[in-house]
Image (spheres, helix red, strand yellow):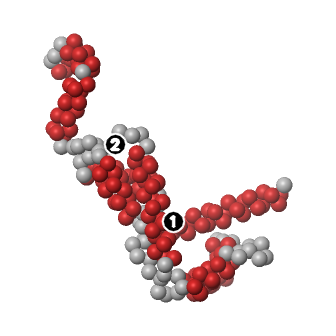
Amino acid sequence: MAQQLDVTPSILRDYASHQQTRTTAAQDIRAYLGVRAYTEADGTRLHEMLVAKVAQTGNTAALSQAAQDWLVQEQILRPTGEKTIETLVYSARTHAETLLFAQIAGQLTPDMCTQLDALCQTGEGVSPLADLIAPPLKTSAAAVVAECARLQAIRTVLGEDLRWGAITMNRLRQWASTVQAIHGNRTDRKSTRLNS
């Protein structure tokens, strides 16, 4: 390295022992590259951007990539903390989902709430909601008719006036697949208990 910089090796050895010199050099390098260090205020702005993004996706990798892209766009160096971005992503997603759920729940009438609660009742072992999210067993005309009936049942409960706001269809699909995964896990556990 000393040869590339055309300096004597002892200068580099001394460089490592002087904190002030390293700090000044780092500032000079940042200025030359046109970037700056990450600050607490940047964390607040990044959190706000991620909260808005959660209406489009809840995927951790996609949100992390959006955070990286934002840092590059804003010409901000990646924070020094190893888990800073990851923590921000999880925090923003949790905060945003709470806001989104409250937005949707605030539109539900007492009658809609009663109908949704009824979908979750498991009086005979399987709730109507489980029936609504179970995939069709085979492709046939009857299966298509059954799918249409399920869709109509959901639309009847939710009504036509429900406003999803900034929530994209992709995000709604992600929530639906989460519910299906939960249902699948419960079904797998139940069949395991029955086979034991």
First reached walking from the N terminus: tag 2 or tag 1: 2
Q: Check disc 1 and report its element: helix, strand or loop.
A: helix
Please identify the quarter of the rendering in which residue 9 is found.
top left
- Marks 2 & 1, CB-CB < 8 Å contact: no
Measured as percent of width and height from the top left, residue 63 is found at 41, 56
| Residue 30 drawn above or below residue 48 | above
Q: Nearer the viewer, mark 2 or mark 1?
A: 2
Q: Which mark is residue 79?
A: 2
Q: Looking at the image, which residue is at 37% across and 64% down?
A: 52
Q: Residues within 10 Å of mark 1 (few under 14, many from 20)?
A: some
Q: Check disc 2 and report its element: helix, strand or loop.
A: loop
Q: Looking at the image, which residue is at 49% across and 78% down?
A: 106
Q: Amino acid at mark 2?
A: Pro
Q: Which residue is mark 1?
A: 174
Q: Choose between 73 and 117: the one closer to the eye.
A: 117
Quarter of the figure that contains the N terminus: top left
Q: Looking at the image, which residue is at 39% across and 62% down?
A: 51
Decide if residue 118 is on the left or right side of residue 31. right
| Residue 7 drawn above or below residue 124 | above
Q: Choose between 74 and 109: the one closer to the eye.
A: 109
Q: How many marks?
A: 2
Decide if residue 167 is on the left or right side of residue 122. left
Q: Choose between 36 and 193: the one closer to the eye.
A: 36
Q: Looking at the image, which residue is at 17% across and 21% down?
A: 5
Whole-number angstrom distance, CA of label 2 to CA of label 1? 29 Å
Q: Amino acid at mark 1?
A: Gln
| Residue 20 drawn above or below residue 112 | above
Res 192 seen here: yes
